[in-house]
Amino acid sequence: MAQRIILIHGRSTKPAKARFAKLQRQALLQGLRRADPVKAEKVANGEVSVDYVYYGDINNRILREALACHKDTLTDNDPAFDAAPSLPDTGYAEAINQLSALGRFDRRAYRKVLAENTDLRFVDNAARAVSTLAALATGALLNEVAIKLATADMGAYLMRRAVGSAVRERLQTPLKRALKAGDDICLISHSMGCIVAYDVLWKFSRMSEYRDVRAGGNRIANWITLGCPLGEAGVKAYLYDANERAYEGGTDKHPKHIVRRWENIAARDDFISHDATMRGDYRDMTRFGYVDSIRDQRIYNCWTKDGTSNPHKFYGYLVNPVTARVITDWIA
């Protein structure tokens, strides 16, 4: 039985597929080497396989069409998608390396980051919009307006069937293959990728056309959600299982018997994971035995680039020792 990590990224514009995978690998290994150098080497040498699920080409296209400003930022080309516009990766490797200079990732280190850099929490309009989702009433129209204001790519995923299907397919293919092969899987999802993962897990565990995935009884050992928006009311209203109902002794909501442990990690001030705890929101998953456990942890994400901090950044989550220790605890 092979051990396999599957990573799926989040919202917003992205570098080209191969370049983005290289940056994720750099951040992942830096974090793992802090936590356990021996186990990190198993990832580095391929003993533990890593799949980098990518839908950045879809995000880039949607955001370029929706917001004129992205025409000036998406200036690179992605050879994996017919030279589609993508985000230049200049400076990201250096920014990841800068995190290696931090001896600690605590409140003091984070405050130093905020003092020395522009604080993105109060200048990103999308961030402010997303953070309001938790306070929304359940009215569909109000949620729809808020989501569209928050981010065009997340809104398209949640409200356009063709877009949602295309994005989910990117995760479904490698995850289905790994589950059917009996792999020991650690699924790591970030931001919007948590929504995609949740929907795919629900489909795999509930829909008749995926009975072949369930037939072998394999389950994801660890599902790690980073900067997760699944607690937001406006997001919940558009999940794949949003219209399912509870019944005596159970519920048709939530992925069922497809994940063993759900590890949710939220950074302080992360505007996407405004509701930072999943254990309460998804208590029925433990109540009915659909998962073995759900654990919430808080961290400080000390990511900076070009003089700007961002507590939501995927690389900052991957480098953090708390995230790394959850992964190395899983690695045999």
Image (tube, grey):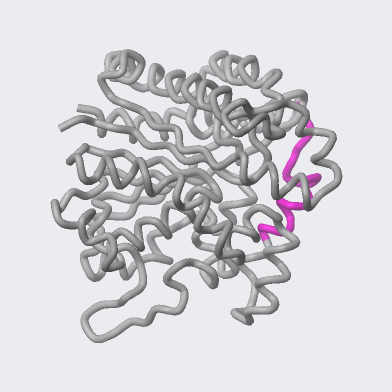
Q: Is the C terminus in the top left, top right, bottom left or bottom right quadrant?
A: top left
Q: Quadrant of residue 1?
A: top left
Whether residue 73 is visible, yes or no, is: yes
Residue 107 lies in quadrant: top right
Residue 297 visible to an observer of this rendering: no
Nearer to us in this view, 177 or 46: 177
- Which residue occupies 42% across, 46% down? 171
Residue farthest to the front, as pictured: 82
Q: Nearer the viewer, residue 220 or 165?
A: 165
Residue at (43% x, 28% y) in the render: 321
- Residue 157 drawn at (x, y percent): 58, 58
Q: For the stretch drawn in magenta, what is the main secondary structure? A: helix
Is 16 included in the stretch rendered in magenta? Answer: no
What residue appears at the point 54 percent right and 72 percent down from the top-left corner?
237
Q: Position of residue 145 (x, y in %)?
A: 73, 70
Q: In the displayed structure, would residue 204 be above or below residue 100?
A: below
- Relative horizontal placement of residue 280, taking residue 299 as reference (left or right): left
Q: Residue at x 54, y 15 (%)?
A: 100
Q: Is residue 89 above or below residue 235?
A: above
Magenta stretch in the rendered image: 117-131
Q: Is residue 287 left or right of residue 145?
A: left
Q: How many marks?
A: 0
Along the viewing direction, whichever of 164 and 141 lies nearer the viewer: 164
| Residue 106 drawn above or below residue 162 | above
Up the image or down, 314 lies above or below 198; here it is above
| Residue 117 locus on image (x, y percent) | 76, 28
